Image (tube, rainbow, N blue to C red):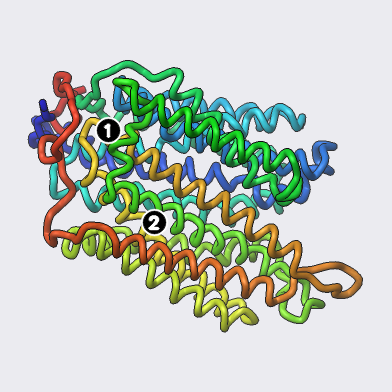
Amino acid sequence: MTSAVPPSSSASPSGHVRSRLVVPVLAFCGMVVAVMQTLVVPLLPHIPELTGASAGAAGWLVTVTLLTGAVFTPVLGRVGDLYGKRRVLLASLAVLTLGSVLCAVSSDIGVLITGRALQGTALAVIPLGISIIRDELPAERVVPSIALMSSTLGIGAAIGLPLAAVVTENFDWHTMFWASAALGLLDLLLVLSIVPESGVRSRGRFDVPGTLGLAAVLVGLLLAITQGSGWGWTSPLTLGLLGASVAVGLLWGRYELRTPSPIMDLRVSARPAVLLTNVAALLIGFSFYANSLVTAQLVQEPTSTGYGLGASIVVSGLALLPGGLAMVALSPVSARISATYGPRTALALAAVVMTAGYVVRFFTSHSLWLIVAGATVVACGTAIAYSALPVLVIRAVPVSETASANGLNTLMRSVGQAGCSAVVTAVLARVTFVADGRTAPTLHAYLLIFLIAAGAALAALVATLLLPPDRPGRGAPRGGEQPGGTVTVSPPTSAARGTA
């Protein structure tokens, strides 16, 4: 195996400054992408009157980003491993910007759905950024930098909701898409100016049949999960999609095991250290998303329900803001926990904190400040978990597969979120009563969701405890530290070397 040479110290003051800006730039890109995922949530109830579309069509503005994000995140991670992470990162940001512009210039639901699909592909920015950090930074900066980059998925979601709510309440709704286009363009310029191309490459060819098979499996599975409550969980369409996903998945898995350059290395993914980390990621994603979905709706429930606070869209969004800020503040702390005690210990602690947060939420759902406190505790646990997950992944995979492996881990979080959305929708739609002439979820519906989310966090704890024990003090591996895999090294281009 050939390994990348760790970056040397900067050769010039300007090179040193640029090397210090790599992580902030990548983190900013991650937060912008995460904001895009939740951008339209406050707008959804108004889309039918603004565009003339049905409520079902409006729901696709969220569903389509989930589908494209799920498909393209592991695929673009693999493309980055093969052809250059910075190159694919720039392409992802360009597509995000294009999608934002499409949404900004049109009120046609078809164009909006297309634009949102393009925005969803940019979710690959986060695993690509993690891979660049692993390849380019000195060993002592890798773990805290990865912690920040991974946490942007939660930070952006928590900050994006209140910002989108403020824009929806006070400006023309196209404004937030123009703003997202401007942020996407800014990201492109920053990456072009600051972020170096990694010299670490994986050998092989791009697996077109494997990519198509993976897309078919994910689209069928996620469509069934996200649309099952509307179609009916026992409807022929839902069951047909699930059955087709399983059948295609078996054929796809057989093909991937035989091809020399698979889109997803199933042998690596089946290692207990990788498999259990991805299971934990799915469960953590489920538990985290319940916090975001339920908080906004709970505080907006009318006072006639006997438990609702009748808050505005803006207030409901702001209720999540302290959690987002706490995730920012906890990022270096969680990195220190992973570096000192090991990422397995950090992930176990995160699951316990998230469970405790839902216990708080179960008993304090009548006061806005206590609701915010409980939501913030869950966000704190999420910050620690999202910081530990990629460190666990990169310790278990070859350096040449960092982007694709973290892409799969990010995908599992997205699948967990999709499953959570389906469960929350089903519970709130079924456990109802009539209040002031309208059907509304009962308080017990929300409490049941808290219990389910706490159960998911506890299941994540079990998966974490089954992982191989930590070796305290061992940082994230770089270059040749990780056995297995084949990499090639291009000539150094890092800003840390003072190059342009």
- Residue at image mark 2: 280
Residue drawn at the location 44% of the way across and 66% of the way down? 457
Viewer-nearest residue: 217 or 48: 217
Residue drawn at the location 44% of the way across and 33% of the way down? 186
Q: Quadrant of residue 89?
A: top left
Residue 26 image offset from top left, x and y in percent: 34, 39
Residue drawn at the location 70% of the way across and 76% of the way down? 443
Viewer-nearest residue: 453 or 318: 453
Is residue 320 toward the left or the right of residue 305 in the image? Answer: left
User: Can residue 118 be seen in this snapshot?
Assistant: yes
- Residue at image mark 1: 401
Residue farthest to the right, as pictured: 437
Residue drawn at the location 65% of the way across and 28% of the way down? 114
Determine whether the residue tagged by mark 1 lies in a helix, strand or loop: helix
**Which comes before the other along the chain, label 2 or label 1?**
2
Residue 437 image offset from top left, x and y in percent: 91, 71
Is residue 173 toward the left or the right of residue 470 in the image? Answer: right
Whether the residues at callouts 2 and 1 have beta carbons within 8 Å, the answer is no
User: Are there few (<14), some (14-19), or many (20+) residues within 10 Å of tag 2?
Assistant: many
Viewer-nearest residue: 391 or 233: 233
User: Are there few (<14), some (14-19), or many (20+) residues within 10 Å of tag 1?
Assistant: many
Q: CA distance from mark 2 to mark 1?
A: 20 Å
Is residue 393 toward the left or the right of residue 154 in the image? Answer: left
Residue 148 image offset from top left, x and y in percent: 32, 51
Determine whether 333 is above or below 189 in the image. Answer: below
